Structure formats: C-alpha cells, structure tokens
Amino acid sequence: MIHLLPRLSKRFSLCVVLMLPLSLVETVADSFRIGVIADCQYCSDPGAGKRKYALSEKKLQACIDHLNTMDLAYVVHLGDFIDRDFESFDVVGPIYKQLKMPHYHVLGNHDFSVADSLKSKVPETMGLTSRYYDFVLDGWRFVVLDGNDVSFHAYPEGSDGQRAAEKYYEDHNLDAPKWNGALGAEQMAWLKETLDQSEEANEKVILYCHFPVFPNDRHNLWNAYEVVSLLSGYDCVVAYINGHNHAGNYAGFGGVHYLTMKGMVDTTETAYSVIELTDEALEVVGYGREEDRIYKLR
C-alpha cells in the first residue's frame, strides 16, 4: 500500500485562537510558516530497496495539494529533485509549479545526473538564475547555498569544473565520498559578506543546502568544518537545514540548529514538513516519516 496522505496537523484550531489573550494572538500573527521538502529524487525507475523513485511523482503531487491548503510564506525543496535523466524534470517540475505560494530550489548532486551536454542547463531548468542566492522576509534572511560548487558530478568530463574538483580533492587529501562537494572560495566570501549584512541588520538567518555540515557524517560537505566555523561566529545564524542523508539527523552546536530532513523518495511513505518561525523557536510539524519537534532559539 502506498501511503501518500499526510496525517492531520497538530495546529491550534480557530476556536482556540479566538479564546487566547490579545498578546498571544499578536505573537501568533507575528510568526509565519514555510514548507520544506527534501529529496523527491524522481525518475521512472521503480527502484529497489528503500528507494522508490517512480512513486515520488504521486508523493510530490499529494504533498503539493496539501501544502496548497495552508497559509505558507513559501516552500523550499532541498535538492535532488530528480534522481537521473533530464526528462525527469518534465514530470515533477510542473507539479512543483502548482504551488500557490513562492517556491524555491536548492541544487542537489542527483540533479546533475544527466548527460554531460545538459549539465549546464540544470539550474535554468529548475528556475534558478544563480546557483546560490538569498532572500529576506519579515526580518529573516534565507541563504541558499550550492554544495555542488566544487564537485565531480556538476560538470562535464574534462571540463575546467571537473579539473578544479580533482585538484581540490587532491590538495585537501580527502577520502570523503566523491558524490559530495564543497563551497568554493568565491561562494564562501559571498556567504561571509551576506552574514555580515544580516548581523548589521539584526536579522535572523536560516541557511539551506543539499549537503549537511554537522554533526560529522559521511554525507557532509568536503569543507564542512570551514562552513561550521564561519557560522559559529555569527549570532544571527539560527539554523542550517539540508537533505542528502535520507535518514535525517539533528545536532545543535554554537547556538545553531543543524537539521537534516528525511528524503521523500525513501519507502512507500512520504516525508515533508511545515516549519513555523517565531522569535522564540522553530516548530517543525512533520508529515509521513518526518517527525514533529521544537527547537528553541538563543
């Protein structure tokens, strides 16, 4: 049996909200919610074991239908929108575009599992004008990183990008999986500048990337230590949210919450979340295999 329908949300009903003191109602009004999906990873292959690639079409459709019933500020997909084949974008792309609210993409390693001649077209196909970017909403800055910046999979064989990945891997004496990647020097400089601006503007910052950086794990970015060290120096950073490790994960460090969201593609059951952002906490409401939890902000 395919489990596509999400369980009921544990949200307050309207009648309860109307009975709250005015001060609490104002607190609720000041918050907003976002939808988070990780690793849809669709292709036409039925898959074996836990990976049910072809089922992701129906899982994503059910997810989008559900999110469209909610008042969400935006939705973000954390990378690996497809598993392979450029044609897979034609299946899940139109479904994701059905969202009634703004929606964003993060680049994953499997998004580049296409023919070499088509790799450069992947960001544009996913609606991206830049591979990493940021946007601001109600005093929060959301920073979208490209963990494929330095990688073996995002560039054609024999290209400058491929050679740069080989040099980086050798120069840093890495033995990490080659299906991970790193933030390049230019992107790291941009990230520092962006965090400086947020600190000065007294914003709260959430970062999105496909690859985790903490805790230590074989799925992490090649330069995870460098990224965590940078983030730890900014009080404005409250969370780093990623996919890639389909099992999910969590750790807190230096006042930052590091959340790895579970992959939608795994098993016959779906996985996605709605996160409410307030000045005090991140409240995660999970659907399918994803779990409910609350993370207090410093």
Image: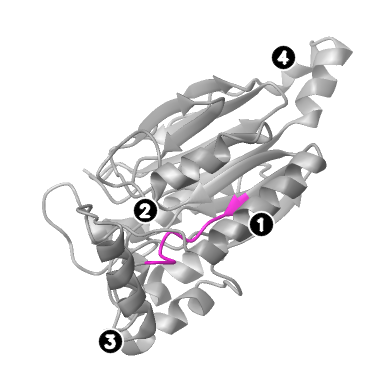
Q: Nearer the viewer, residue 188 or 122?
A: 188
User: Where, by quadrant of the figure, is residue 54 drawn?
Assistant: bottom left
Residue at mark 3? 158
Name which residue lies at 76% across and 24% down.
28
Quote the CA–CA distance across marks 4 and 2: 35 Å
Of the two numbered discs 2 and 3 on the same chain, state the one appearing first in sequence.
2
Marking on residue 134: 1
Q: What residue type is labelled 4?
A: Val
In the displayed structure, does residue 239 sit left or right of residue 138? left
Q: Which of marks 1 and 3 is nearer the N terminus?
A: 1
Left or right: where does residue 157 sit relative to residue 148? left
Label 1 or label 4, whichever comes before in sequence order: 4
The Cα–Cα distance between marks 1 and 3, rounded to whole angstroms, is 31 Å
The magenta segment is 143-150
Q: In which quarter of the image is residue 150?
A: bottom left
Image mark for residue 39: 2
* Mark 2 or mark 1, whichever is nearer to me: 1
